[in-house]
Image (cartoon, rainbow, N blue to C red):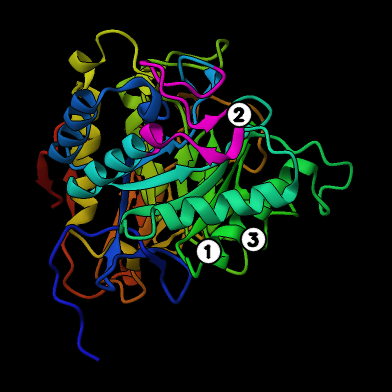
């Protein structure tokens, strides 16, 4: 049939046939370029939310990680789910009795996101809210809640379902799952029971993890949320190698202005650049950056734009202008044959700035390749891996300046 005519901004709506990347509502590849404003629903006024979404559109973002319900650990002002001005999601804590003013506001914020071209990775339940602001009395309630959420947001074009968070299952048998796993699964089944087929994934906690690490969730997720504070190429490549193939997204790494490993070097602009470039040359279908303002500290409005974020935006634009979805990681060194630096074979703790691995990817036809050198060195490239007549150019990852390679 004929392809739909684009009439609005593209959103993440489905997974490609080969399981490697996301498609938008028009059937085209869409590269995820995300931020992580976890506490947006509970911390921001409508005026502030409009400012945030408009700014992110201006800076080229197209995705955001957001908790639907608040708890203090996910940045909310209160553990009962109350917003900054006292709106509560539930009547007397009953997850099936909704306080309409709260739900009207979060619906409005999701519409703002859509108006600004932002796909929201939305957590109806997360590992922080269960037992705090979200206290179901049965698995059946989790199922009914999922159906209610799906029906409430049925007409929004810009939602991808999420759960987890810094979540570690307490199940004695990981494959059978815990009570919390069962509640989250029931929520997803409730969503699916309404006919909703929007992609779902699970964020697991750990210094390095991906959704499919947990045997209960491995067959239940539609894409891999990659979480690592280590050199990101290794974690993304591990996810890319999983079978059956599902998209791998760098969902969380070191946030700007934040370092959750105090024994390691501070997070710098170079840290952020490495995380993005390593991921996009290792098979990622996109990536999220984040900042210490995920919980919107005082003065966050003045920190919306930074040098590091400007550089990330430039790097994302660089990939967006090429057929990035055709790139295949050069993990076998077919293209870059020498000078790759230290290839990691274990998941020993290591800061992003402590590894010098040169990641690379190329298209099967050899017409395009991208090599990322995190440090200055000489590399060897096998020209026979590329199509005849291709030309090479150096790109400065701090400025975007280009210089032809002789």
**Residue 242 rendering spot, x and y as whole percentages:** 61, 61
Q: Give the labeled residue for mark 3.
A: 220
Which is in the foreground here, disc 2 or disc 3? Answer: 2
- Residue 93's label in the rendered image is 2
State the residue at coordinates (32%, 60%). Answer: 155
Residue 315, compared with residue 31, is above or below; it is above
Residue 229 located left or right of residue 173: left
Residue 189, compared with residue 33, is above or below; it is below
Of 203 and 322, which appears nearest the observer? 203
Question: Considering only order in the chain, which callout, 2 or 1, is on the residue closer to the N terminus?
Answer: 2
Of 366 and 165, which appears nearest the observer? 165
SS at circle 3: loop
Residue 21, compared with residue 388, is above or below; it is above
Whole-angstrom CA distance, mark 1 to mark 2, is 37 Å
Q: Which image quarter: residue 366?
A: bottom left
SS at circle 2: loop
**Residue 39 rendering spot, x and y as whole percentages:** 41, 26
Q: Give the labeled residue for mark 1.
A: 246
Whole-angstrom CA distance, mark 2 to mark 3, is 29 Å
Q: Is residue 127 visible?
A: yes
Q: Is residue 337 visible?
A: no
Of 139 and 287, which appears nearest the observer? 139
- Residue 84's label in the rendered image is none
Residue 217 located left or right of residue 356: right
Label 1 with label 2: CB-CB less than 8 Å = no
362 drawn magenta? no
Which is in the foreground here, disc 3 or disc 1? Answer: 3
The residue stretch that appears in magenta? 79-103
């Amino acid at each position: 049939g004929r392809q739909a005519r684009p009439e609005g901004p593209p959103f993440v709506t489905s997974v490609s046939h080969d399981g490697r990347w996301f498609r938008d509502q028009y059937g085209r590849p869409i590269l995820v370029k995300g931020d992580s404003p976890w506490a947006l629903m509970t911390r921001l006024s409508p005026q502030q939310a409009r400012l945030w979404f408009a700014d992110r559109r201006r800076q080229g973002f197209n995705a955001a990680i957001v908790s639907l319900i608040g708890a203090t650990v996910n940045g909310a002002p209160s553990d009962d789910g109350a917003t900054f001005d006292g709106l509560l999601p539930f009547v007397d804590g009953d997850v099936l009795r909704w306080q309409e003013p709260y739900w009207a506001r979060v619906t409005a914020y999701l519409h703002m996101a859509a108006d600004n071209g932002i796909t929201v990775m939305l957590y109806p339940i997360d590992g922080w809210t269960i037992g705090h602001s979200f206290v179901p009395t049965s698995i059946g309630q989790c199922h009914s809640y999922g159906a209610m959420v799906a029906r409430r947001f049925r007409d929004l074009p810009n939602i991808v379902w999420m759960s987890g968070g810094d979540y570690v299952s307490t199940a004695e048998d990981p494959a059978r799952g815990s009570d919390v796993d069962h509640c989250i699964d029931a929520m997803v089944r409730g969503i699916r029971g309404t006919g909703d087929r929007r992609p779902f994934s699970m964020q697991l906690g750990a210094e390095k993890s991906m959704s499919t690490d947990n045997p209960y969730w491995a067959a239940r997720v539609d894409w891999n949320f990659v979480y690592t504070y280590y050199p990101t190429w290794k974690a993304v490549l591990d996810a890319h190698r999983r079978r059956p193939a599902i998209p791998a997204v760098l969902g969380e790494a070191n946030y700007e202005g934040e370092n959750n490993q105090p024994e390691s070097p501070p997070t710098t602009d170079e840290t952020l650049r490495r995380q993005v470039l390593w991921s996009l040359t290792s098979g990622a279908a996109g990536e999220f950056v984040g900042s210490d303002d995920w919980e919107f500290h005082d003065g966050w409005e003045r920190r919306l734009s930074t040098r590091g974020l400007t550089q990330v935006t430039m790097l994302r634009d660089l990939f967006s202008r090429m057929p990035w979805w055709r790139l295949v990681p050069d993990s076998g060194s077919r293209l870059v044959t020498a000078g790759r630096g230290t290839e990691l074979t274990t998941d020993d703790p290591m800061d992003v700035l402590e590894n010098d691995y040169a990641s690379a990817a190329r298209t099967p036809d050899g017409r395009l390749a991208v090599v990322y050198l995190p440090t200055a060195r000489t590399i060897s490239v096998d020209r026979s891996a590329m199509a005849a007549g291709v030309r090479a150019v150096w790109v400065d990852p701090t400025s975007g300046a280009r210089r032809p390679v002789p």
